[in-house]
Image (tube, grey):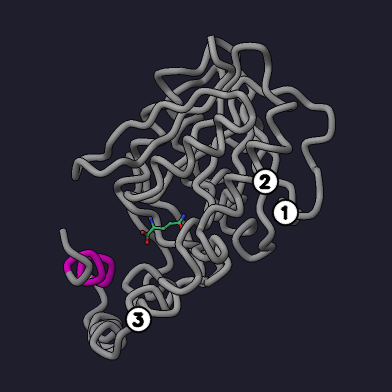
Amino acid sequence: MNEREIVLDFYKNDPEGAKKALARLDAGERGAYIIGEWYFWRHIFKLNKDCLIPRPDTECVVEKAIADLPQNAVFADLCTGSGCIALSILSERSDLTALAFDISEGALSAARENAEMLGLSDRISFIRCDLLSEDPLENRLFDAIISNPPYIRAAVVDASPDLSCEPRIALDGGEDGLVFYRRFVRDFAKNLKENGEFIFEIGFDQRDSVTSIAEESALSCKVTRDYGSNDRVAVIKKSV
Ligand code: GLN
């Protein structure tokens, strides 16, 4: 279903609501914000204007984590937004637990609601913090640190009207788009267990720069592609 069909399906028993929603769609609003939810993985996630709209390509991060995480693993999800990555992983693996972090209280309230709705609240905790300036991971150790951080170059966000409906802080990765990867690899590698790994979503053109960031910290980086054959998932770990 495309955006319009999803909105119409949401209002299938409410013709008046459908009419108003279509008018908002035609005026440039995004369907996900109009209906307050969106499809990702096998679920429908609640979201609000503080959340990025989940993209299908991000499901590759979920697939990688489900395949890689050892039995009874504990993972962190940085910049969790609506919680769609962490909650999709937990929904497939009943042995796992997670800590999820975000700077936005609005996004976290959607994430908590999604955790409740999926019956996963007992295996995930949500923590509000600024991951660029605080160290909420302290001395905790994780089997994986997962993130789809903001990674678009600031100038590209400025020049992309199609992104203007979404929260800028969920998209803008600074001047070169790499601010979050640099911070996470440099400062949170200490929070990985011996065989632990970072699993990051990256931009289609960030393979070489994210690999360099990993190598500067003496870590290895392996990048895999998404359904559209673009580089999308970076797995960073201690070199063997
Ligand atoms: N994949 C998103 C896009 O291309 C960006 C998401 C992000 O910055 N994490 O619009």
Magenta: main secondary structure: helix
Q: Secondary structure at mark 1?
A: loop
Please indicate whether residue 74 sits to the left or right of residue 65 in the image: right
Amino acid identity at mark 1: Leu
Amino acid identity at mark 3: Pro
Please indicate whether residue 226 sits to the left or right of residue 211 in the image: left
| Above or below, comparing residue 170 to residue 237 in the picture | below
Q: Residue at x 61, y 24 (%)?
A: 218
Pointer 2 residue: 183
Task: Give how far apart the Cα atoms at labels 1 and 3 are.
Answer: 26 Å
Q: Quadrant of residue 138?
A: top right
Task: Give how far apart the Cα atoms at labels 3 and 2 are.
Answer: 28 Å
Q: Residues within 10 Å of mark 1 (few under 14, many from 20)?
A: few
Q: Name the quarter where the N terminus is drawn.
A: bottom left
Q: Residue 4, percent across and down?
A: 19, 72
Pointer 1 residue: 132
Q: Residue at x 62, y 20 (%)?
A: 143
Q: Residue at x 31, y 87 (%)?
A: 24
> Which dot marks residue 161?
3
Which residues are drawn in magenta? 5-11
